[in-house]
Amino acid sequence: MSGIQKNQVWIGRVRLKQYVVALCAIALCACQDMDAFLANQQSLEAYQLPGNSIDVKRLEEVSFKSGEVNLYGYWVQAKPSVSDATTVIYCHGNKHHLDEYWERVTYLEQLDVNVLIFDYQSFGKSEGIFSEENLLADAEAALAFVQQREDVNTDKIALYGYSLGNVPCIHLASRTGFQPLWLISEAPFAAVDSLVQGSLSLPLPSGWLTTGTFNNLANISQINTPYLLFHGGKDDFVRYQDNGQPLFEAAPEPKSLQLVVEANHNDIPEVLGVDHYINLMREFVAP
């Protein structure tokens, strides 16, 4: 067999493999779409807050309405010694409820801020059904809840999004009539297209898996606030070159990038070193 023939056979096998993967993905669509993949369908009766190191006197379990359904979360009050604290709305990632991200809350509160973390519809104790439309509505409801609190300076509200949580955060930051004090993104994806076709290596249109676009790239150019992006160089779920890089390039100034070369999707603070991670955030948010 000639070299050309061998190459043709090899190319044919690659294409066949792609078609098989695509057919498998299509079959998968019959029982589970991308919205279901992104959501957490396991409800909770109560939160545990594992490894909590925050004084319980500063913790308040809260609930608020998103449309007709109840969302649940936790409010962390800044230390009593802190006056006129910034309030951070923390939007967590997919698949897990807020208990799984509580350690990040303990990092954030060391910046001497108030923190709201909440579960989206169908996550944790929250009611409802997950969808892109509902996710954005949940973010709007969380912002309204914070703005209505008497202990919040509404001119000092900031946003932190992790993975999926960047969708509601970037949506809020790009919204007319609201200017957050700052926005931090950790491991964001550009849009569901890049997640399906790049990170998940599925050679098929994202529309076959979800009716949503989850399009951070379309919104990031509309933000009007200082922007800090953390991304792992070894993130094999949300690859930097397909997601973090185009997002950072599209974001307006002022902006700062922390590409953590040895980090994957969920271990950026640990790879950086938690103290260094907190200090980087402190330097970014300092007036």
Image: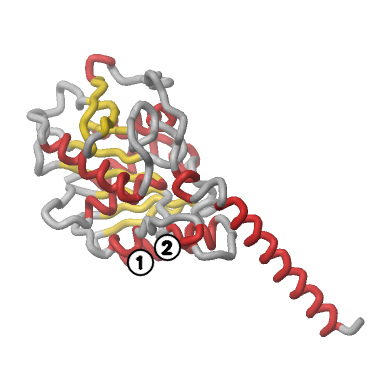
Q: Outermost residue toward the top?
A: 57
> In the image, what residue occupies the spot 40% across and 59% down?
190
- The reply to whether discs 1 and 2 touch (Cβ–Cβ < 8 Å) is yes
Determine crowd level at label 2: few under 14, some 14-19, many 20+ residues with C-alpha closer than 10 A.
Answer: some
Determine crowd level at label 1: few under 14, some 14-19, many 20+ residues with C-alpha closer than 10 A.
Answer: few
Question: Residue 104, percent across and down?
Answer: 38, 33
Q: Is residue 138 visible?
A: yes
Question: Residue 168, percent across and down?
Answer: 30, 48
Mark 2 residue type: Gln
Label 1, on which residue? 249
> In the image, what residue occupies the spot 12% across and 38% down?
147
- What is the secondary structure assignment of the residue under circle 1? helix
Which residue occupies the foreground of this view, 16 or 60? 16
Mark 1 residue type: Glu
Position above or below: 260 against 129: below
> In the image, what residue occupies the spot 54% across and 57% down?
199
Question: Residue 163, percent across and down?
Answer: 41, 47
Image quadrant containing the N terminus: bottom right
Q: Is residue 263 visible?
A: no
Position above or below: 89 against 239: above
Which residue occupies the foreground of this view, 164 or 209? 209
Q: Outermost residue toward the right?
A: 1
In three-dimensional space, the C-alpha distance between marks 1 and 2, rounded to whole angstroms, equals 6 Å
Label 2, on which residue? 245
Question: Residue 271, percent across and down?
Answer: 50, 41
In which image quadrant can residue 138 be found? top left
The label shown at residue 218 is none
Position above or below: 274 against 172: above
- What is the secondary structure assignment of the residue under circle 2? helix
> In the image, what residue occupies the spot 39% across and 56% down?
212
